[in-house]
Amino acid sequence: MVSLRPPLRDLAGGSSDVELEGSSLLAVLRSLETQHPRIVGWVLDEHGRIRRHVNVFVNGEMTREDLPLEPGDRVHVVPSITGGCR
Amino acid sequence: MTELLVGTRKGLFVLRGDPGRPFSVAHRVFAGDVAEFADRDPRTGRTFASVTSGFYGPRVYWTDDVMADRWKQAEGPGFPEGSQSSVERTWIVKPGEVPGQLWAGVDPASLFESRDDGETWSVNEPLMKEREANTWNPGQGGLALHSICPWPGDPLKLAIGISAVGVWLTEDGGATWRTGYPGLVPEYIPEEAREGSNALCVHNMHRAPLRPERLFIQFHGGVYRSDDAGATWNDIRKGLSSDFGFPLAIDPADPDSAYVIPLVGAEDRTTPGGAVKVWETRDGGASWTARSEGLPRENAYLTILRQAFGTGGEGEELQLYFGAESGEVFGSADAGKTWFEVARSLPPVTSVRVA
């Protein structure tokens, strides 16, 4: 299960939770792009790397693309906390 | 009525009004994101916007209805597999010389081309390989390809300006590139290091459409003119209040014309003495005249960024508009003779174009 917040939720057609399959976090995020093409380029850059200011949590732990996933793992995609700039 | 596309740190504003009085905000879109640049392709009426989210990265949008709340997201610009680069921001989108063709300049300095009116984009590989094979140093604003100057009627010729690796020229549609360095002097590095240096910080470059071999540059310290299509450059800063600034504009009807907005040098980057003045030349830079009637004359310390100076029309009816990081937009409908306040209290202005 992948949980999304605005504006990603809007790009996924309003879905806050999306059921996806994949053996790794990268595979799941690619699957998210396939199901919801408007998200292409928002979470992953053109080389498949999670953007610098996007944080992805799996079961409450912040992680990166190559983490293996198991059925039932819970993924949260959130913007990083970078306030105070402008 | 005049329509302006005003990019800001907090979205894109569409301003509409009659010259001489403040304009109204007709529309705001991309709220919260940085609208780096927006312009309309006069051939199709399609409007483009470069937008960067602090979280979700950069993208280019397009629309055939500027009042729409939801614009279409282009496919690209993005680097192909095998490149180690990622697009940080898109600095400019510029119509090309064949139907459907547009150019885009990005950070890290690369040129992208669209052949389908901006819906998909592909990188110019020869220039990308030049960057990846050599040492290109960024300016303070990044390694920015921000100026694209097509040659009217000839799609094979193009001049581009990059901060900070100078002028690059192609005469075969981008298959091969050469530099246009002679005459540009990087006074910001030690004198003994200048010979052969590629650390040439072009801030903005424009071509005179009626005499395409003529180009003007606002440089990081200096204003230059080329009369040989960018191969060599002549210093034309004499007479200006400061040789530092970001944007430059021209009157398309007059190849001898250029407008700059000098700022106190690199250490400050605000309008000199707290007075806002646009400087105009009508003799190719042999002399300059300050144009300030209607602009703030005291207590005004503005910074005007490189894309924040746009024009519409030409000749006696040339309209000029510029926006400041402090949120004001000023305009002139008589080629700079008099000015009026277009808007105030906008977010910091990144770009201004007449739609």
Image (spheres, rainbow, N blue to C red):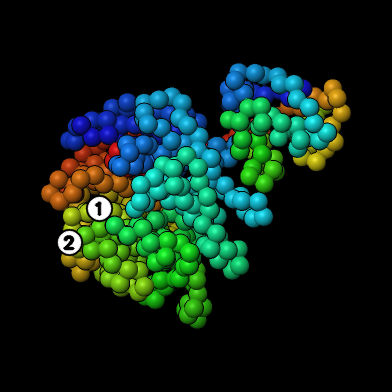
* Amino acid at circle 1: Val
**B231 or B245, nearer to the observer:** B231
Q: Where is residue B119 in the image (x, y as percent from the top left)?
A: 47, 39
Q: Where is residue A55 in the image (x, y as percent from the top left)?
A: 71, 34
Is residue B241 visible in the rendered image? The answer is: no
B112 over A10 or under it: above or below? below
**Left or right: B146 as drawn, with respect to A22:** left
Mark 1 vs 2: CB contact within 8 A:
no
**Residue drawn at point x = 65 percent, y = 51 percent:** B81
Q: Which chain carries label 1?
A: B
The span from disc 1 to disc 2 (Cα, nearest Å) is: 13 Å
Q: Which of marks 1 and 2 is in front?
A: 2
**Residue drawn at point x = 63 percent, y = 27 percent:** A36
Judged from the image, the secondary structure of the residue bearing numbered disc 2 is loop
* Amino acid at circle 2: Arg
**Left or right: B339 as drawn, with respect to B53:** left
**Residue drawn at point x = 36 percent, y = 58 percent:** B155
> Which residue, given by chain and number where applicable, does mark 1 sit on?
B278
Q: Which chain carries label 2?
A: B
Q: Position of residue B67 (x, y in %)?
A: 36, 26
User: Which image quarter is the C terminus of chain B in?
Assistant: top left
**B23 or B206, nearer to the observer:** B206
Crowd class of label 2 (few under 14; some 14 to 19; many from 20; radius 10 Å): some
> Which residue, given by chain and number where applicable, does mark 2 sit on?
B282
B118 over A28 or under it: above or below? below
User: Which image quarter is the N terminus of chain B in?
Assistant: top left
Judged from the image, the secondary structure of the residue bearing numbered disc 1 is strand
Crowd class of label 1 (few under 14; some 14 to 19; many from 20; radius 10 Å): many
Using the rendered image, report if marks 1 and 2 lie on a common chain: yes
Q: Residue furthest right?
A: A70
A25 over B294 or under it: above or below? above
